[in-house]
Image (cartoon, grey):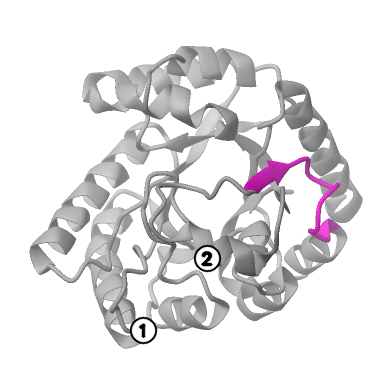
Amino acid sequence: MPKLAAFPKAYMKALCKDGSMKISEWISLASKLDIQGLEWYAGFIEMKDQNKWSDFRKMGEDTGKEIPMMCCSPDFTHPDIKFRNNEISKQKGWIDMIHILGGKYCRVLSGQRRPGLSVDEGINFASDCIKECLPYAQDRGIELVLENHYKDDFWEYPEFAQKKDVFELLINNINHPNFGVNYDPSNAFLAGEDPLELLYNISDRILTMHASDRYLKSGTIDDLRKVEVGNLGYAEMLSHGEIGKGMNNYDAIFKELKRVGFDSWISIEDGVDGFDQLERSVNFLNKKIIEFWE
């Protein structure tokens, strides 16, 4: 049966930029949730001190929560090979990080969709970099999962492999036992595509999942694309919402995941409108998991 983890989506600025929240505070808050794990982010300010990594693992374990997965945002599509090699080195460091935290899955991205980058160039850059990291991950029992992403919080340009066709080209170019997909249905909407169509094409490659629901506070998807380039992070018109009340069809999603034997981690990206919203999303997903897997 799948297990639930939570990601501190509502507290990223506090944990990653201004330091107004400590990791111990997030762990304490998340301990109240009916979940089994915590999804980590490599960019937490306090993670700069490697001596603290095992302490954070123990903090989670002391509240009955493991750290099974971590989000990293390597930028593998930069045209400068020295830049890409540095990203590979950073990714290997993040693999060490999740290994020490006791996890198994490390989310990777392709890189930014910079102006002038062709599909062939991006596929080659990203796949070569990921392949370079995989033996290092395998030696440590870590699996790299590529997410169909929209845009990292701290990037200028959107994800290179945001579109389904490009994403599928990339994952089909990498055949390794320690590589798979982190499926995020909400991000497919932001590519102007059907998340179920993507799911049915890649369901046998899915190792982990992000659960959320997305809303546009104003405008359309086409309007979003006009403002996303050149802005750091997510566009202002984009919003996360309570799971089960948005556009995602979780009955169809879970039916397909059950069909292919999915039995791994689902991490919740929610709570931007309050901790009670996150609690409701947890309750919704727990009920759905029981409905489809018991």
- Visible residue check, residue 149: no
**Residue in the picture at 30% in, 71% down:** 126
- Visible residue check, residue 245: yes
Residue 173: x, y in percent?
38, 82
Left or right of 250, for residue 62:
left
Q: Residue tagged by mark 2?
A: 226
Q: Secondary structure at mark 2?
A: helix
Is residue 257 one of those drawn in magenta? no
**Main secondary structure along the magenta-highlighted residues:** loop
Q: Nearer the viewer, residue 178 or 152?
A: 152
Left or right of 67, for residue 202:
right
Circle on res. 52: none
**Residue in the picture at 45% in, 76% down:** 171
Q: Is residue 170 above or below residue 255?
A: below
**Which of the two discs, 2 and 1, labels the residue nearer the N terminus?**
1
Task: Report the amino acid beneath label 1.
Answer: Val
**The quadrant where residue 81 appears:** bottom left
Circle on res. 119: 1
Task: Report the amino acid beneath label 2.
Answer: Lys
Range shown magenta? 238-250
Residue projecting furthest to the bottom: 120
**Residue in the picture at 27% in, 64% down:** 76
Is residue 244 one of those drawn in magenta? yes
**The quadrant where residue 240 appears:** top right
